Image (cartoon, rainbow, N blue to C red):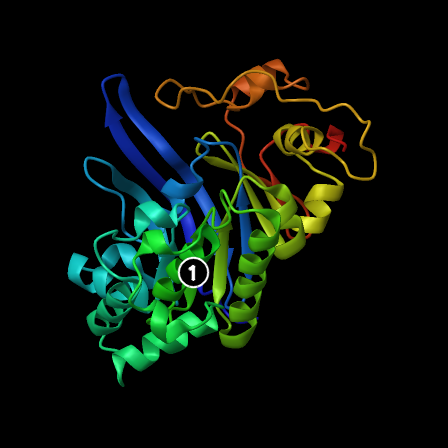
Amino acid sequence: MSPPLLAVRGLRTVFPTSRGRLAAADGIDFEIASGEALGVVGESGSGKSVTFLSVLGLVRPPGRIEAGEIRFDGRDLRDLAPAALRRMRGAAMALAMQDALSALNPALTIGTQLTETLAAHAIPGDARAEAVRLLARVGIPDAGRRLGDYPHQFSGGMRQRAMIAIALAARPRLLVADEPTTALDVTIRAQVLDLLDELRAEAQLAVAMITHDLAVVAERCPRVLVMYAGQVVETGPTAEVIAAPRHPYTRGLMQSLPQLEDPDRPLYPIPGQVPDLAAVDAGCRFRNRCALALPACANPIALAPVGPGRASRCIRAADVVP
């Protein structure tokens, strides 16, 4: 088996606060292979975005990576100088943000933003012709004319496509797609996801899909990482995790979703809230919201194997059922 493109081990990213240090990503382990789509799900505040901002070297001070390895193609990114890591962003790893209207510069045309990216990474050839090709590839009609338009002149779906075109301009090997279909209607969402699937198949592009939408992960990502309160609580093949979750939090996520095959089934929202990360202890962070909690859940619980390719951070993993 070939080594993974990205391997993260023991990642811990902390932020100082007035109430003490907050570990927004705490002991994170995962891998992504070339051409793979990994779904990353969890409530807001679970650490999804911070984990991948850490991978990309985009955590802003006073936040910092306190521990762990981030190996890209066998090379630990934490050993790189800031200038070397900056050169890798875009060229080897890229980020497509969730709000394209905010992420794109409103004072510059789409064409300028594309050609600047190409120039920054010294992509050979005619920059304008390559910008036209990129816009056409992501499905924007009349791409040559639209290069002169500003972000506000694009629809929401077209802005998201333009954002993906900019992210892929330097032909990276890993794309972090942070909620890429937020606020898009169902049809446009499907088109954007189809585009990512096509790009992944064409160039063996690895995609980390950060989302709240379990339906997207079920349809598009063969493997899933479930995060809660800064930790990975379950991971494994998506179909198996959805069919038979082995962590109460994953089960809660599934039970809070409407079922098309059973529209009259009541929804069961997860009670309570994500804990204050500045005040958590060493025990299970979900235990105050968990119907299966035991006194032993106040002790440290590791992410442990529960089957081939699967792991759960729960001492009662065998008792969790859909």
Q: Nearer the viewer, residue 75 or 187?
A: 187
Residue that carries the numbered disc 1 in the rendered image: 175
- The quarter holding residue 83 reads bottom left
Residue at screen point 25% across, 71% down: 115
- For the C terminus, the quadrant is top right
Is any atom of residue 74 visible in this view?
no
Q: Nearer the viewer, residue 12 or 268?
A: 268
**Residue 162: x percent and y percent?**
39, 61
- For the N terminus, the quadrant is bottom right
Q: Nearer the viewer, residue 125 or 14?
A: 125
Three-letter code, disc 1: Leu
**Residue 249: x percent and y percent?**
61, 29
In the figure, 29 relative to 119: above or below? above
Q: On the picture, is 153 further left or further right than 298?
A: left
**Residue 79: x percent and y percent?**
24, 58
- The quarter holding residue 267 reads top right
Q: On the picture, is 240 further left or further right than 139?
A: right
In the figure, 249 relative to 52: above or below? above
Q: Nearer the viewer, residue 20 or 253?
A: 253
Q: On the picture, is 62 further left or further right than 253?
A: left
Residue at screen point 27% across, 48% down: 58
Q: Secondary structure at mark 1?
A: strand
In the figure, 318 relative to 288: above or below? below
